[in-house]
Structure formats: C-alpha cells, structure tokens
Image (cartoon, rainbow, N blue to C red):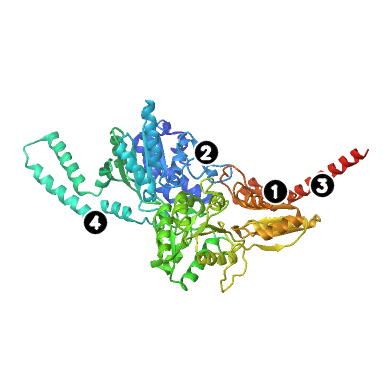
C-alpha cells in the first residue's frame, strides 16, 4: 500500500492533502486495484480509467453529505478504497467480502445499489427533488459512463432533469467503451465533439474571433470577458454539445479526465453553478496499466492474472462453456438457415456472440445497452419472417419485461430468448443472479421455457426454440458444460417432453438444468441408504410433462423438485399447481430452490450451499419426506391402538 493511501481512511482525510499530492494518490489507488483484482478477478479497466475522476470528486465535494451516484457501478473500485473499505478491499467479490458494485448496506457513501446501467440520472433527479422539497442543502452528482448513456432510461432521465431545472450535475465519463466499443448514434455524436470536422471548425472559428477581438477598443479583463462570452455563444452554435443544451443542461467540456490540473478547476467551477449541468469528461478505459490500455476489452472483466506480465492464469483443460456452445450452435444453424439472426444488448463478449459476428457480421446486431429496444427490434424482425435470437443475460432481460409481454407474447411472434447466466452467477452478486426468469416468464401466455442438463441438450434446445412458431426461452448456466459428447446432427426435442434418467419407487427427484446432475448424485447417495429414487430431467418448465410428473407422483408418493431459480413461481410451484389441479392430496412434496432473499456475491459452490442446493441437501430433503411419512404412519397406528383399548 502506498504511503499516502494508508493515511486515507475517508474522503475527509483526502481533503487534507495539498492538491499537488493528488496524482500520487491516483497512482497508489491504481496500483491497489491492479494488485487486488489480479487475485480476486473483477472489473479492472473501468475503475482504472475513472481514478482521477474519483479523486477529484471526493476532494471537492462534501461526501457523503453530497451524493455521488455511479453508473455503471463497476467504475467505483477506487471510490470504495477511499471511502473506508481500503483494509477490506482484498476481499473484493469474495463471500462476505466487499461487493463488486456500490451497495447501500456496505457504506454510507454508496447512495444507490447500482449494477444495471442507465439508472443514475433518474435517481439523482429524485434525490435532488427530495432535497428541494425538504429544504435541505447538498449536491447531487451522477457519474455515467462505460456505455450507460446508450441506455434508453438515461435519455429519459436527461429529458426530465433538463426540464425540471433542479440543481444537479451529470458527469459523462466518456471512454468510448462499454465492455466492448460503444455502438450507435450517440457514440458517434460524442466522438465528433473531440475529433474531425467539428473540432477543426471550432479551432478555426476561435482563431478568427481572437483576431477580431484583438482590434476592438477594449482592454484588460473586459476583453477577456467578452472573448469568453463570444466563444461560449459560438460553441453553442457549432459544437455537438448543443444536444445537451437543447435538453436543458449547461454543457461543459470536453475535459481531459486524466489531468487533475484541468479536472479539478473545472469541477470546482461547476460546483458553484445553478441548474442542471453536464460535464463531458474524456477518459481512457484501463488508463495507467499498459496491458489494459492496449486491450481494454480483454481487461474489462478479469480473472486472476500476473500483475507484472499481465498474463492470465491458465485454466485446466475442460469442457467448453455454455456460452461458447450456444454461439457455435448459432453459427452452425445460421449457415444452414439464412433467416436466423442474432441480437445482443452490448454483451457480444459475455454471450460469446462476438464469434458469431466474425463469421456472420451482417446478421449480428449489437443494439447497445438497450434491452427494451432489443426485444421489440427482435419482434419487428420476426414479424417480417426472420428468426431472431436475442441473447441477453437473465438479469438484464428483466429490464424488458413489458416488451416481452406486449410486443412478443401478445403478438405471438417467433422470438427466441437465449438466457445466459441463468441461476446463481457467483461473484457478481445479487444484482446479477439469474434467479427470477422462470417466475417472470412462466406466467406469460404463448411462452415456451426450457433448460438443458448439459451442452449437448443445449444445442438441441436452441434449434427447438428457433423452429418453434412462437416465443421461446432457453435458459442456461454460467460456466463450463458437463463434458458430454456432442451430436454432429442437431435434432429438436418434442415440446414439453421430459426425460426419465433413473427409475425408482420411493421418491421422485424432479430437476431442471444443472440441477439434474446434482439430483443424479443424490439418487446414488439414497440408493446406498436403501432408498430407490427416480430422477426426471424436466427440460421444459412450460409446458411441463404432466403425464410423467403425475405418474411419478402417484407411484412414489414423495416428490422433491430442484431448481436454480426462486422457489416462488418456478418449477416447484408448477408441480404443486399440477398436483392440486388433479386433486392429488396423498403426495408429500419439498421444493428446493433459491430462497426468498437476495443471494450475496461469492463462489457458486458457496452460494449453492447457502441456498440448500447440494447433493447432500437433496438427499436430506428426500429422507425427511420419508421420515415424516413414517412418523405419521406410526402416530396413526398408535391412535388406532388407543381407540381399540
């Protein structure tokens, strides 16, 4: 740890330092982020690029009274270090350690739980409005960057905030990147502010104005004031920042976000300005670490690496990841069917569709951080005969729920949703758990939902979903597959057909997706205890294979459902609904799944243990069901004997 950083336990300590020592603080912060993420993994590039901005804001603003809202939250590692979490920062993203995103439970300096992009401006406006209604006095600053301005919600917030005229500041941390390079008209618009024809025109006009003003009969400070006013007027006419001015913001910038000697005076002046202000700060993702500067996409989210060489630790050879299998399948199917197209919402790398884009660039569409638009865009494609596949993380598809209902399910068009990162996702934590997709999709008319037990079944389900003439969702887990052989010729699976993997008469284990393998392990454990278990690979959550479920329930009389999704509204709920509808009352059931609380960040195995989703937990649940029945039978028999007496 650096000599300055070890003296900073809070931003108030930072403010005691002379301004000339702040660059050293920035260097020490960057070094700490690099050293810690090299051991824990995490979002490296965005936090490195925002280091000067973090220091400048905490140096100038009276935090936590003044409120800083980070968007996306993975820019905020250096913010966490400066705000009392330095000594715990080595636990980043570990079980019971420091969260990878701002978290209100963790610190009074984190004013909004944020990991989904585009939320900061709306929240900042809400806080500023509450401040004014309560007669309080504090500043509100939204720092939006790393692709978040492409989110539709960010534009909604700008529109409302500019009209409301509250005192708040929006800082656009413009690094031209999300996970990968930003896409869309807004990105091009911002780029023109700094480069090309616009920049040349500004410089040329400024030079001409200086010549004219030099001949005017004014001297001293009056000339400077007049020059500033003329330049400001001309800037508003010819610089692309006029868009923000027209939305009601005072536009300031662009400012070099890595020069504290420019950044601090600019923010100091802005702090004293009334009304909504937008400061355009230009940064470089991964700045200060040569490897992340050279490869900002690679070093956006890192696994363990050597900080000296930048080399990532080699993983042991293993099965391909589900994301890769999905994309390989998409490429294979798309080369046979020209109607298939792929859609990503700023997650080409995360969903592995970047490989699809290389092979079929004209049929791969990255729409930016815009899940709502992505879904309705897919609906439009489907209405005109295409077969769109929207690959969106489970947690991010939540943002487009109305569009799923209104534009896809109600219209009943053949859109396939590839729900990557379903279930427990590990160290990204509660904001990213794919816990709710089964519950929020199962209730929708016309929707088909399926989940594979392994990677071979995944490729079959992708084809099944694409060929289905209506909406279909395929949910699959984060990480590696099971290492099973892959069929060369991909075939569809009959809609709604489950697969009986093991037969037994004592207890039925009904499992979905990656839980099927755990159920098989549990069945082996139960057999050692003299209990014969059936294992049903459900495959389809909607429609369920009612015939197989009812046959097992009537025969076994004990049913355990296992899913890596919320217990409320998922697989277990569906089985219980079926049994109730059939009037079956003599079957004892246990629903295993994610409990009704948010699951914290940490290793997936620890999360499964926390949720009671291990083979041992399944085995114990089955034994408890049978023991409860035995106890009930004994009580009943005892009661009859008592009556006879």
The answer to whether marks 2 and 4 mark residues whose Cβ atoms lie closer than 8 Å is no
Circles 1, 4 touching at the beta carbon (< 8 Å):
no
Q: Mark 2 and mark 4: span between their CA atoms?
A: 46 Å
Find numbered disc 3 in the image and state the secondary structure of the residue it sits on: helix
> Which mark is first along the chain, 2 or 1?
2
Q: Nearer the viewer, residue 521 or 287?
A: 521
Whether residue 610 is visible to the viewer of this picture, yes or no, is yes
Label 1 CA crowd tier, 10 Å (few <14, some 14–19, many 20+): some
Task: Specify the label residue 630 is tagged with.
Answer: 3
Labels 1 and 3 touching (C-beta < 8 A)? no
The tag on residue 196 is: 4
Choose mark 1 or mark 4, whichever is in front: 1
Q: Residue at x 64, y 56 (%)?
A: 515
The answer for how far apart the CA atoms under marks 1 and 4 are is: 65 Å
* The label number, if any, that marks residue 590 in the structure image: 1
- Quarter assignment of residue 509: bottom right
Residue annotated with mark 2: 87
Up the image or down, 636 lies above or below 197; here it is above
Q: CA distance from mark 1 to mark 2?
A: 43 Å
Between the C-alphas of marks 3 and 2, the distance is 53 Å
Image x and y of residue 310, in percent: 47, 56
Could you tell whether 171 is left or right of 179 in the image? left
């Amino acid at each position: 740890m650096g000599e300055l950083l070890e003296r900073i336990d809070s931003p108030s300590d930072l403010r005691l330092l002379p301004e000339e020592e702040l660059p050293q603080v920035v260097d020490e912060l960057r070094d700490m982020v690099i050293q810690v993420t090299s051991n824990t993994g995490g979002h490296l590039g965005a936090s490195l690029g925002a280091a000067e901005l973090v220091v400048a804001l905490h140096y100038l603003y009276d935090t936590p009274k003044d409120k800083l809202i980070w968007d996306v939250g993975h820019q905020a590692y250096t913010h966490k270090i400066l705000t009392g979490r330095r000594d715990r920062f080595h636990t980043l993203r570990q079980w019971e350690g420091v969260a990878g995103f701002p978290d209100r439970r963790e610190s009074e300096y984190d004013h909004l739980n944020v990991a989904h992009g585009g939320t900061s401006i709306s929240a900042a406006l809400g806080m500023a409005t509450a401040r004014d209604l309560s007669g309080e006095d504090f500043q509100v600053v939204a720092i939006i960057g790393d692709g978040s301005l492409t989110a539709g919600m960010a534009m909604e917030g700008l529109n409302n905030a500019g009209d409301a005229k509250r005192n708040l500041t929006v800082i656009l941390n413009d690094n031209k990147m999300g996970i990968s390079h930003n896409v869309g008209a807004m990105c091009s618009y911002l780029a023109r502010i700094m480069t090309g024809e616009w920049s040349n025109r500004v410089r040329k006009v400024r030079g001409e104005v200086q010549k004219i003003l030099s001949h005017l009969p004014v001297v001293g400070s009056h000339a400077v004031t007049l020059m500033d006013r003329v330049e400001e007027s001309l800037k508003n006419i010819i610089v692309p920042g006029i868009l923000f001015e027209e939305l009601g913001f005072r536009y300031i910038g662009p400012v070099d976000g890595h020069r504290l000697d420019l950044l601090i005076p600019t923010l100091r002046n802005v702090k004293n300005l009334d009304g909504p202000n937008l400061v355009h700060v230009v940064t470089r993702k991964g700045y200060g670490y040569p490897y992340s500067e050279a490869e900002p996409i690679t070093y956006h989210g890192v696994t363990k690496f050597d900080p000296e060489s930048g080399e990532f630790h080699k993983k042991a050879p293993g099965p391909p990841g589900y994301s890769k299998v999905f994309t390989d399948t998409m490429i294979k199917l798309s080369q046979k069917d020209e109607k298939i197209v792929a859609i990503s919402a700023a997650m080409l790398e995360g969903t592995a569709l970047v490989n699809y884009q290389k092979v079929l660039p004209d049929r791969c569409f990255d729409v930016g951080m815009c899940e709502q638009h992505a879904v309705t865009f897919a609906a439009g494609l489907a209405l005109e005969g295409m077969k769109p596949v929207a690959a969106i993380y489970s947690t991010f598809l939540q943002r487009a729920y109305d569009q799923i209902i209104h534009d896809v399910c109600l219209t009943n068009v053949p859109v396939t949703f590839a729900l990557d990162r379903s279930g427990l996702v590990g160290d990204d934590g509660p904001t990213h758990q794919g816990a709710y997709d089964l519950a929020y999709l199962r209730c929708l008319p016309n929707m088909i939902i399926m989940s594979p037990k392994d990677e071979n079944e995944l490729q079959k389900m992708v084809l099944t979903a694409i060929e289905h003439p209506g909406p279909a969702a395929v949910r699959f887990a984060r990480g590696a597959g099971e290492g099973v052989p892959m069929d060369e010729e991909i075939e569809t699976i009959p809609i709604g057909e489950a697969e009986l993997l093991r037969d037994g008469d004592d207890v039925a284990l009904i499992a979905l997706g990656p839980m099927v393998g755990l159920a098989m392990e549990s069945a082996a454990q139960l057999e050692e205890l003299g209990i014969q278990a059936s294992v049903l690979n459900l495959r389809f959550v909607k429609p369920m294979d009612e015939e197989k479920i009812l046959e097992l329930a009537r025969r076994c009389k004990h049913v355990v459902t296992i899913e890596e999704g919320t217990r409320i509204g998922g697989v277990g709920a569906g089985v219980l609904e079926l049994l109730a509808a059939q009037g079956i009352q003599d079957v004892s059931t246990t629903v295993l799944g994610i409990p009704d609380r948010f699951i914290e960040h940490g290793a997936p195995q620890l999360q499964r243990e926390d949720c009671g989703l291990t083979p041992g937990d399944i085995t114990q649940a089955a034994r408890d069901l049978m023991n409860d029945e035995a106890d009930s039978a004994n009580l009943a028999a005892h009661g009859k004997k008592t009556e006879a007496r």
